[in-house]
Image (tube, rainbow, N blue to C red):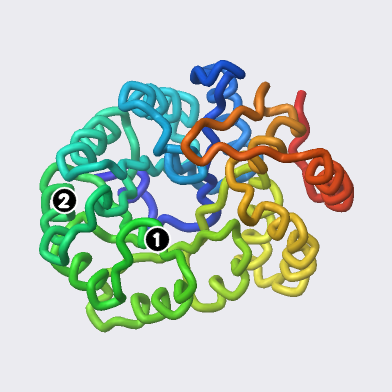
Amino acid sequence: MSHYISEHNQFRGIYGITATPFHADDKLDLRSLESVVHFSVESGCHGIVMPVMASEYQSLTDEERRKIFDVTTKVVDGRVPTVAGVTGVSNIHSVELAKYAQDAGFDSVIAMPPHSLTPSTSENLTFFDQLDAALGIPIWIQNHPAGVTLSAPQVTQICETFENVRYVKQEGQSAAHIATALLEQESNSVEGVMGGAGCKDLIAEYRRGMCGNMPASHYGDVHSRIWNLLEAGDEHIAREIHTRMAPLNNFESGKGARAFKEILYRRGVITSTTTRSPGKKHLDEYDLSELDTLLTSIDDLLTWKAA
C-alpha cells in the first residue's frame, strides 16, 4: 500500500504537473528538472504529477521517462505524494513503465488506455486489469478527450472491478457533469476526482465535491493558495484571486507547454523554454509582450521567489 495513503484518507489538493526541461539542443536538462520539481513542492503544490501531457510525455524516450521517475522521487523525498504518468502505446508499455515507477517510490500512477489504435471497450477493461494486477499502489484513470473517452458508467465499472483503480482525472467539455455522476454513484468505488484545464473551473469543482486539480505547476503558489482558502472556508477571497488569474488562463489556451515554460523561465526555475516536436510551439513578440503585462498584474500573488 502507498505510504501516503496508509497515513491519509485521500489524495487531495493541487497536484502540480511539472514541465520537462530541455536544453536548446533538445536534450533533457537534469539540473532544471531537479529545480522545477523542487519549485513545485516549495511553492505549495499538495502533490506532484510527472510526466504527463503538460510534461510533453509523448516526446520522451522510455529511458528519459525512467530517469524522470528517479529524479522526481529523489527530489520530492516524501514531502508530498507523487503520481507517475504511465500512458504508453500498448498495454505492456504502460505496465512496464508503471512497475518501474512503483519500484522508484511513486505513491500512485495515472494512465489513459493506450490509444495509438482505438481500443474496444473490452480492451479498455483488459488494460486496467493488467495494470491493476501488476501494481500495489493506487491507479488514476485519466479520462481525456485526446485519448479514450470513457463514460461515467464505464469509469465506475472499472473502479468497481479493479481494486487499485480508485481515482479519476476528469477532463473535457462534460468533465464537471461526469465528475458529479462518479461522485454520486452508490458503490463509492471512486475515491476521488480531480479536474484539469489549468484550474479554470477550480472553485466550481470544489463545490461539486471534487478532491483537487492537476494543473501545470508554474503557478503552484497561486493555485495552492486558492485551494487552501477554499478548504478554510474563505471562498470570497479564493474567488477574487481566481478571477484575477482568468486572463493568464486564457493566455495559456492553445499555447501549451511553451507558455508554461516561458513562465517557469521568467520565474528563475528553468534555463530554457525549449519544447520538443511533435507539438512544438512558439511565442512571438506580441505574445511575450502580453505575457509581460499579465504577469505584472499578478506579481503580488507570486509568493515563491528565486534565490
Q: Please tell me in which quadrant of the rendered image residue 163 appears.
A: bottom left
Percent x, y for residue 53? Answer: 46, 45
For disc 2, the marked residue is 132
Secondary structure, mark 1, is: loop
Height in image: 15 above or below 190?
Answer: above
Left/right placement of residue 285 relative to residue 147 reads: right
Task: Name the residue carrying label 1.
Answer: 144
Q: Position of residue 262 (x, y in %)?
A: 70, 36
Q: Secondary structure at mark 2?
A: helix
Tell me where residue 39 sits by quadrant.
top right
**Dot 1 crowding, Cα within 10 Å, few <14, some 14–19, many 20+:** some
Foreground: 17 or 208?
A: 17
> Residue 59 vs residue 259: left or right?
left
Disc with the residue nearer the chain's start (1 vs 2): 2
From the top left corner, tell me how far across and down residue 235 is, in percent: 70, 73
**Marks 1 and 2, how far apart at CA:** 20 Å
Q: Which residue is nearer to you in this view: 217 or 227?
A: 217
What mark, if any, has residue 239 been given in the picture? Answer: none
**Residue drawn at point x = 59 percent, y = 75 percent:** 204
Q: Is residue 43 above or below residue 248?
A: above
Image quadrant holding the N terminus, namely top left
Amino acid type, label 1: His
What residue is shown at x 66% (from left), y 24% (from top)? 272
Tell me if residue 229 comes above or below residue 73 in the rendering.
Answer: below
